[in-house]
Amino acid sequence: MTPEKKKQRRLRNLALLSLLLLAVGGTFAFQAFNQRAINDRLNEVDINVGGRVHDYYNRDTENKDVFVENYGERPIMARIRLSEFLETRQRNEANFTPLVAGTSRDDVENWTTWIPNANDITDRANNNPSNAFDQYASLIFGWERSGQDAPWYMPTFNHDNLDLRTAAAGHARDWIEGNGATDAVTDGATHPGDGTDAYWSAGGSFDNSGPIWPGEEVTNQTAQNLQQDRAPMTMHQWSNLPNEDKIGNFWVVDHNTGWAYWANRLDSEQASSYLLDAAEMTAAIEDKVFNGFYYYGIHVESGLVHPDQHEEFLNDGEQHHAELEDFLRGIQNGVMYDDGPNPLPNEDSAPAAFDFSTMRPGRIFTMAGEEYRYLENQGSGNHMIIRNDAIRNVSWNAQGTVLVDWYDALDSSVQDIVQPVANNFTTGEVEDASVTFTGGYRWIPNNLGGDVAADITQVVPGGTARAFALSLADVTRLSGGGLAFPNLTQRVFSVHGRAWWWLRTPATDTAAWRLTAAGGHLHGEGPRTFSLYNGGVRPALIIHQTPN
């Protein structure tokens, strides 16, 4: 396929979610009706480009999970928009009365677009028809559980780009599979699971032989949603973020149009964090209908496009936020700022293509097949960098071997610019309970001393050109505003979501220091034998480029 034809790939989704309470104190039902138009293209190709909206709902627990999965082989950009409908009827009345005049249950196109307050995503905008729903329905956005990693899901079995159905599980109902019914009874599930919170977990699987659900007759293993870097926010709130925080794994709502955008490219086999986690009716609905009936619905319209086609999000005839164009370009490029002649963060380039002297701390770049984070300019043409993800399932005891193997596999053009460091680091040792912190919970240690404080990685003539793990002292001096790790999230942010990683500093004879995946916090109580799927060893290098 020619480059021009490749640019014609695009993927669209349309989903409709409906919530219906048949009687106050009676049966509570919540269904998903979904529709999508997928991947306009000029020719059939072997490359699979596709994504699917997941909708997990359980009417008994009121759990409601809505997110996007990229099951294809190319990155996509995603946006979702909600609209609402509410009608009520007293028992002595013959007909339902809509909350917003001129709307009807059967015509979802005239439902009221959800528009949040510019300063608060949980509050519908004043002086807007959406505000009428504030007293009756509360939408819960994002997913965050104290001390927990991101949730798990079952990847879709349906990889047919021409199939318009969602992955609807539990009491959720797909619009096509349910034949467009709005009776809150007709079944339309297209995906396994009962829709309860945390139904899927690490190590789970499902055999779709039969097939039981639409798609391939294969056994899928559970996969993990991306951890949200921050809660969903409005474009106004996003505008006030520092540039280095504007692109990441979170949702941003254009409060002019109601479109919510995933603030990052969604790569192959990734699934976004939740946009919607629950939709709860308030007590005010009982006061409104007494012993009557009401119907409440949420319509979810979504669009998925290849990053090169992001202008389709702009050319839809709507009055978008003034900064949306820059935002979308930032998602496409993977960065919100211009730092001179360097290639874009996701543009794989040879070492000679970079001018490291112009890079700012924390800048992401891709060099000879590996994605890195720039840490600091050490002067004299020397620059410290670190792999922008951890090598997973590696214990502290095994990290030395893994670092050697990783370095040996590097492209020779990278090895040629690696500087020597000490053959053996004098790390010292400090117990977790002995360290105090400043600036926030386990953020920056403020009482390191002795060999632990002195263990700063630097070029050592006569040493060994090799990869290494950062020390506790390294992370301390690289954390803070304007530095490589400006906040907790950036300490563990990676190309595949947050990842915990080991430092080289021991805590005791059996424990060592590491950064936790969920919070980016420093902890020194983990046993050296610990290894897990979502983190491990993060190789760093000092490279040299002759100053201009």
Image: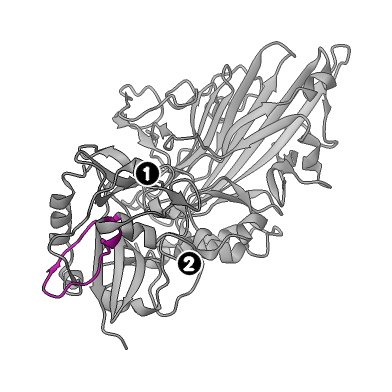
- Report the residue at 30% width, 66% height from top: 385
- Can you say whether 322 is above or below 510 in the image? below
Left or right: residue 258 versus residue 222 is right
The reply to whether callout 2 and callout 1 are in contact (CB within 8 Å) is no
Q: Which residues are magenta?
A: 452-471
Which one is nearer the viewer's eye here, 437 or 178? Answer: 437
Left or right: residue 266 versus residue 329 is left
Q: Look at the magenta stretch and give its main secondary structure.
A: loop
Q: Which image quarter: residue 192?
A: top left
Q: Give whichever of discs 2 and 1 has the lower sequence position.
A: 2
Which one is nearer the viewer's eye here, 26 or 529? Answer: 529
- Report the residue at 52% width, 37% height from top: 143
- Can you say whether 27 is above or below 334 in the image? above
Q: Position of residue 454 (x, y in %)?
A: 27, 62
Q: Position of residue 281 (x, y in %)?
A: 70, 25
Residue type highlighted by circle 1: Thr
Separation of residues labelled 2 and 1 (CA atoms): 22 Å
Q: Is residue 86 visible?
A: yes
Q: Residues within 10 Å of mark 1 (few under 14, many from 20)?
A: many
Q: Which image quarter: residue 241?
A: bottom right
Q: Which residue is outermost to the bottom?
A: 548
SS for tag 2?
loop
Disc 1 target residue: 516
Disc 2 target residue: 482
